[in-house]
Amino acid sequence: MLVVAACSCAACAKDISAQVTGAIQQAALASAPAGVSRAVWMDVQRFYMTRSYAAAWTADEKQAAAALRVLRRAPEHGLPPAAYVSANLSGLLAPERKSIEEALDHDPGRLAQLDLRVTAALLALGRDVAVGRTDPASIDRRWKVRRTAPDLAGSLAQSTSESLDGWLDTVRPVHPEYAALQKALANVQPQAGSEAGDDDAARRIALNLERWRWMPDDLGERHILVNVPAFHMAVREHGTPVLDMKVIVGKEEHETPLFSAAMKEVVFSPYWNVPDSIAEGETAPAAARDPKFLARNNIEVLRRGGGRDDVVDAASVDWSDSEALKSLAFRQKPGAQNALGHVKFLMPNGYDVYLHDTPADSLFARQGRALSHGCVRLDQPDALARYVLRDNPEWNDAKIQAAMEQEDEKHVALKAAIPVYIVYFTAWPRADGGVDSWPDVYGYDARQADKLH
């Protein structure tokens, strides 16, 4: 009789398992349920396909407990735990006296829905850890840098047969700054059962962890990082700074856009082609008021037409003819007064933003340096010129200095392009475990905080 009873129970369990599998398959192949994004639901579908739609959590108490531990790790990444695990879900995954099947009255439909719910929560958390909870374009539509999502469904499926506890560490950003900020966050977060903690610091670090989730894994063996809030630029090799300097960035009404591009060319003794907005709003009105303004500032007047720009005599221009002024352009000749200084570094992009020298060296003594029209001004442009041309032996220090002081513009192509990233980090980890922080110069922290939680 005991043998018969045991066989009967085994057959019953097998029958429930098959019914749960069928219910999971039917639900997984349907549309995403409310509150689950399309991207996450596609990951859910891929996850169950690798398992032939077998339950992952409801039939295994240890796996259920491991899933709950992972979901509760959201705060380690500065993410809100309530977005992934509710009190109800916690209770179902960690029943005190009953198995999950008993807690759900051995109902295949309810078991399937719970299994799917746990998987969706895990994959939602994994996706948020991997590529961010918010879209950077919602903070600034020009923010183009993005990380490529890893194989979340495949890695989760593999972790269920190995160790689920370390899964988030396999999908999080690879940059050491991310891990360092995580440690710093743990030091300032309130501990369980205690109100102690620095909430402002925790919030700032969480926002910056999110920004690292937008960064691509491979920044290049050598690259240039311009951090707008820090008013700082660093040339890095294998993640280590080899050259750094102060910079000036765009003022609030002329924000420096956040993007990545490849530096391809150095221009010594450059002309400054006055942007149309500045020409219309500043240069032309100044020339109309003061006939000596253009000569005093070494600015030429150009007339556009026929695919070419011809230099014209400023004295021949009717400054009161607004229609005729639309065909004019302005450029400042090379020299000590040139707004771009003695050198600029070109990285083709859709914003016409580049790095350049400036004659206004005194501005680098200021603490807040959001002062430009959008381009990035460099404190040590000669040092950057030497660095980017180091692969070209003919461009020694003497030749670079001479090129910076000549009267004619000189273009020099780099032998290898160098990636440039213009980023926005208001918190940066230090080697001693602390965090450097800077003011939210463009208000992105405030804008992002409303969307992260």
Image (spheres, grey):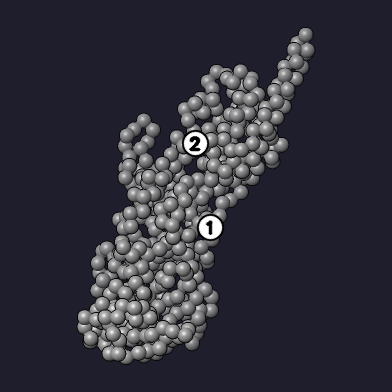
Q: Image point 59% across, 46% down: which residue?
A: 152
Looking at the rendered image, the quarter that the N terminus falls into is top right
Residue 162 percent location from the top left of the image: 63, 40
State which quadrant residue 10 falls in. Answer: top right
Nearest the viewer among 299 and 365 is 299
In the image, residue 353 above or below residue 191: below
Residue 34 percent location from the top left of the image: 53, 35
Q: Callout 2: helix, strand or loop?
A: loop
Residue, disc 1: 217
> Disc 1 or disc 2, which is closer to the eye?
2
Looking at the rendered image, the quarter that the C terminus falls into is top left
Task: Report the amino acid beneath label 2.
Answer: Tyr
The tag earlier along the polypeptide, 1 or 2, is 2
Q: Image point 32% across, 42% down: which residue?
A: 199
CA gap between label 1 and label 2 equals: 25 Å
Mark 2 crowdedness (10 Å alpha carbons): few <14, some 14-19, many ≥20: many
Residue, disc 2: 84
Apparent side of residue 24 relative to residue 307 in the rendered image (left or right)? right
Residue found at the very far left of the displayed protein: 290
Q: Callout 1: helix, strand or loop?
A: loop
State which quadrant residue 357 falls in. Answer: bottom left
Q: Is residue 85 visible?
A: yes
Q: Image point 38% across, 85% down: which residue?
A: 303
Q: Is residue 329 visible?
A: no
